[in-house]
Image: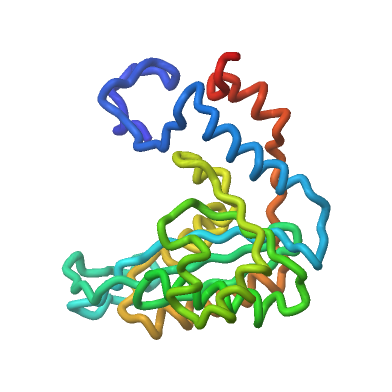
């Protein structure tokens, strides 16, 4: 918009007054490119219901209540929402998406501990993918995202059973853009969570409705970026040899 920049400043000119936070990957880093290529190769695998590729990510949303009831809109006047509000805590979000099948599942919880993650994994394997031999799981390397969390939540025999049905692929540090669950989280926030939501129950209901509608439409993610693209376009991230 016009007021975003001084008069006469062209779009492509340097604008030192503006900045943007970004996850900048390290240059010449073997660990980064190794993890990146591993994930990209997984994304190129053909669809196989016995070995589905599932991406998982987490986020949160502040629960915000109204101090005063909004004034409904009417012809010629927009809805008015008071700028005063009350904080009602934070809701945690677990996003799970199978890009090639156009399926996703979202859990809204009160906490996001190792045991919470383990419970999501168990439900994913036993309820949503009971017939899969293994789930190829793509996620970031958060300290809760590992097999040890299963052993904290369940008896050893159950933890081992679940672990043997997982094939984990970690995105590299500063490489969360490689996780397709981030794309789905962005859609969720834009279509469902872009307003004040006062309590956990309401948010769970709204998210479940969004999930059902999106699954009914079989919304897939068409990932195009390949290892070959990375070796060309992201050459600076590869070590010199």
Residue drawn at 50 percent across, 78 percent down: 119
User: Is the residue 222 above or below the residue 228 in the image?
Assistant: below
- Give the color scheme: rainbow, by chain, secondary structure or one colour: rainbow
Which of the image's four quarters has the C terminus?
Answer: top right
Quarter location, residue 229:
top right
Q: Nearer the viewer, residue 151 or 60?
A: 151
**Farthest residue in the front direction?**
156
Residue 78: give x, y in percent of width and height: 35, 66
Callout count = 0
Q: Quadrant of residue 84?
A: bottom left
Residue found at x 24% / y 80%:
69
The outermost residue toward the bottom is 201
Residue at 58% across / 32% down in the picture? Answer: 33
Is 101 or 136 nearer to us in this picture?
136
- Quarter of the image containing the N terminus? top left
Q: Residue at x 35, y 37 (%)?
A: 21
**Residue 74 appears in view:** yes
In front: 26, or 21? 26
């Amino acid at each position: 918009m016009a007021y975003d920049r001084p008069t006469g400043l062209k779009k492509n000119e340097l604008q030192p007054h503006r900045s943007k936070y970004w996850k900048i990957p390290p240059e010449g880093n073997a660990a980064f490119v190794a993890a990146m290529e591993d994930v990209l190769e997984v994304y190129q695998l053909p669809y196989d219901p016995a070995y589905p590729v599932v991406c998982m990510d987490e986020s949160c949303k502040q629960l915000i209540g109204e101090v005063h009831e909004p004034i409904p809109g009417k012809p010629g006047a927009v809805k008015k929402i008071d700028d005063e509000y009350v904080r009602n805590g934070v809701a945690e979000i677990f996003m799970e998406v199978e890009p090639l099948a156009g399926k996703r599942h979202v859990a809204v919880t009160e906490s996001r501990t190792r045991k919470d993650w383990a419970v999501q994994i168990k439900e994913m394997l036993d309820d949503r993918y009971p017939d899969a031999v293994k789930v190829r799981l793509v996620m970031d390397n958060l300290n809760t995202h590992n097999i040890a969390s299963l052993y904290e939540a369940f008896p050893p025999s159950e933890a081992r059973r679940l672990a043997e049905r997982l094939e984990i692929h970690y995105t590299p540090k500063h490489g969360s853009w490689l996780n397709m669950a981030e794309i789905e989280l962005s859609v969720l926030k834009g279509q469902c969570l872009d307003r004040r939501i006062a309590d956990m129950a309401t948010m769970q209901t709204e998210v479940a409705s969004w999930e059902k509608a999106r699954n009914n439409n079989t919304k897939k993610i068409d990932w195009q970026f390949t290892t070959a693209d990375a070796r060309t376009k992201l050459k600076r991230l590869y070590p010199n040899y």
